[in-house]
Amino acid sequence: MKTFGSRTAVDGISFNVQPGEVLGFLGPNGAGKTTTMRMLAGFVAPTAGRAEICGFSIDEHPVAAKQKLGYLPEGAPTYGEMTPGDFLRFIGEVRGLTGIDFRRRLTDVVERLQLRDVLQQPIETLSKGFRRRVGLAQAILHDPPVLILDEPTDGLDPNQKHEVRELIQTMAPGKVIVISTHILEEVDAVCTRAIIITNGRIVADEKPAALIRRSRYHNAVTLRLELTADLAAVADDLRDLGEVRQVDVDEHASTVTAFPRDGAHILPVISSLVAERRWPVEQLHLEAGRLDEVFRSITTANSAAGTT
């Protein structure tokens, strides 16, 4: 638990993460994500309760706990006048890395995060994306068994995001990785488990695939039709199918979405109807589910409950 005056920022959150798990830590702004991450990393003391890293209490054995930890904080603060090379050398000294061990680890993180071209450039002159990569480099420099990453792809372009996600996946076996993020596609891409919090409390703790199955779009079928198609007529025919519970029309996107009744698999019957009616379909898509819709549903419902 963490309180600031009369405000409770984190309220009774409790969870364990095992080696090999990549935990996505999600929640709307102000839900308590960053405060929780800071307590786990020892940057903020809890008002009540305790955090442990590899069995070491962050309060009672802070040095031993932090030796096991790599932490990328929000904003990835660094020393702007330093170069990435100088900064990582400083971090290596703090972490007790010297000689060949430091050179080996430095070479590894520089190559993994593609920092070679900016290694001697002042950090304050780097783009936000490169500064973020320098912050991630310091977190993994000592090859810790536990990583806590607050918005690790913030400020990165799509290619860089893909590279960082691949890096996380390659590091995941044998490590504990906790990622705070507001990018829901990131959860689906790299996380093996997701926790959603709101009002400082856990409201969901499941595998991403299980969360996606909560979506009303799970097993729905979306048809994108040519602009000249009669969307209303297509929707009416789909509503006549006994397996279809509801049909939504998006005229702007020229799509029609059919939702199954009682978890029915409606793709075969809709495919047959498309062929029979010869609808001008450009794309027919079976929906796995939409994590953003599940996230909104869970967080808004629990936010409303918290204000009653």
Image (cartoon, grey):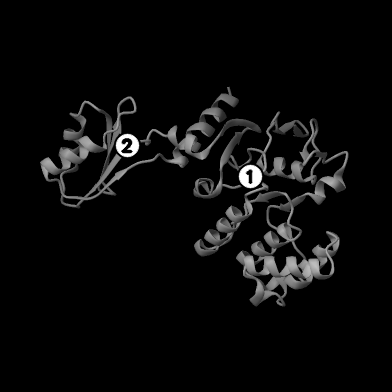
Sequence-wise, which precedes: disc 1 or disc 2?
1
* Residue that appears at 79% across and 43% down: 44
Three-letter residue code for mark 1: Gly
Above or below, 259 relative to 117: above
Residue tagged 2: 220
In the image, taking residue 38 as reference, residue 165 lies left or right, namely left
How many tags in the picture? 2
Residue type for callout 2: Ala
Q: Quadrant of the C terminus?
A: top right
Residue 244 percent location from the top left of the image: 25, 29
Quick check: can you spot residue 19?
A: yes
Residue 125 drawn at (x, y percent): 68, 73
Q: Quadrant of residue 215?
A: top left
At 73% across and 52% down in the image, what residue appears?
71
The residue under label 1 is 20
Per the image, label 2 sits on a secondary structure element best described as loop
Q: Quadrant of the N terminus?
A: top right
| Separation of marks 1 and 2 at Cα, in angstroms | 32 Å
Displayed quadrant of residue 196 = top right
Q: Can residue 307 be seen?
A: no
Residue 292 x %, y %? 47, 41
Closer to the observer: label 1 or label 2?
1
- Mark 2: few/some/many CA within 10 Å (<14, 14-19, 20+): many
Tell which of 143 and 183 is nearer to you.
143
Residue 188 in the image, given as x and y percentages of width and height: 50, 46
Badge 1 marks a residue whose secondary structure is loop
Q: Contact, CB < 8 Å: mark 1 with mark 2? A: no
Q: What residue is drawn where x is 71% and y is 52%?
A: 73
Tell whether 282 sits left or right of 29.
left
Determine which quarter of the picture holds residue 103.
Answer: bottom right
